Image (spheres, rainbow, N blue to C red):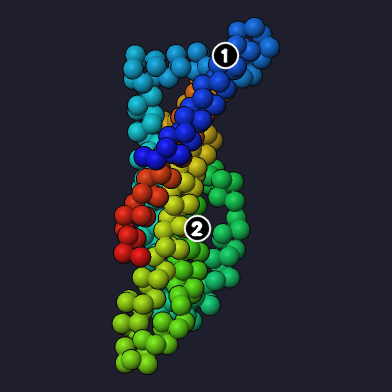
Amino acid sequence: MTTRSRLTIAAHVVFIVAFIGLWELASSHDLLDRTFFGRPSGIALFLWKGFVTDGKLWLELGYTLFGAAVSFLAGSIAAVSVGLLFMVVPRFHRAAEPYLTLLNAMPRIALAPLFLLWFGLGVGSKIAVGCSLTFFIVLSATVAGIRGANSDHTILSRALGASQRQVFFKVTLPSAVPVIFSGLRLGLIFALLGVVGAELIAAEHGLGQTLAYLQSTFSMDGVMGLLFLLALLGLGVTALMNRLERSLLAWQ
């Protein structure tokens, strides 16, 4: 680690400690209303009880992560498959594009009550919402990545006698992988957002359901604690996808 990196990390740590310290000080002197902003010590106590003392938050976290993971995998696999099919059969793409645009324009969170009627209060309806969000993001990235392949490489490959199949799998598809990974990174975030959003509306378990309950009981320490936890989850999955992308695309 370079000196500059260490200084950057130290600056972030100092800022975070100062921010939390000022927040705690303002709350303890009633400069900030705890009813609306909570208190760092209360947030830490809530998370400690939830994860260490009684462990109830582990169950809710597990439900949310499971729904997000299944949503991401199902939506991404379906999107990449459909995107490849569109590029192999352009007529099918032209025929399906207006309908996909129409479906993509629909707010999926607004459709969550419909998914609840279809799949119930369990994890199925949350997966449906998350999958619908992931699918269109990854599909758009797949199509854009394949369309953005370098035409000079394609023309040169054909001039050297490569078949259409060889050009697609050895030239077009590898060049589209970075763009597809960008879509996958966003798709994972939106899968998590879709699951939590659906849990906020109605659910048996999950962080979103817990957040809605805490909000209804005006437990602001719990609300802020779960918001920080969700922010850390988003940061974690983004960092994971970035590291995976760097390792898989090291050949570039």
Residue 54 visible, this orientation: yes
Q: Residue at 45% x, 42% y: name it.
A: 192
Instruction: Give the image quarter of residue 153.
Output: bottom left
Which mark is drawn over residue 137? 2
116 and 16: which one is in front? 16
Residue at far front of view: 3
In x, y percent, where is residue 243? 36, 49
122 and 174: which one is in front? 174
Is 205 on the left or on the right of 212, as rendered? left
Q: Answer whether labels 2 and 1 touch (C-beta < 8 Å).
A: no
Q: Quadrant of the C terminus?
A: bottom left
Query: Type of residue at label 2?
Result: Ile
Residue 83 vertical position relative to residue 17 in the rendered view, above or below: below
Q: Residue at 47% x, 29% y: name it.
A: 10
The local crowd at label 1, few if under 14, some if 14 to 19, many if 20 or more residues have their Cα within 10 Å, is many
Q: Residue at 53% x, 44% y: name it.
A: 112
Q: Report helix, strand or loop for mark 1.
A: helix
Query: Type of residue at label 1?
Result: Glu
Give the total of numbered labels.
Answer: 2
Is 143 on the left or on the right of 55, as rendered? right
- Does label 2 or label 1 sit earlier along the sequence? 1
Q: Which label sits in the foreground, 2 or 1?
A: 1
In x, y percent, where is residue 247? 31, 54
In x, y percent, where is residue 215? 57, 23
Residue at far right of view: 31
Residue at far top of view: 29
> For the residues marked 2 and 1, what is the alpha-carbon distance in whole angstroms?
40 Å
Is 82 on the left or on the right of 223, as rendered? left
In the rendered image, which residue does mark 1 sit on? 24
Residue 38 visible, this orientation: no
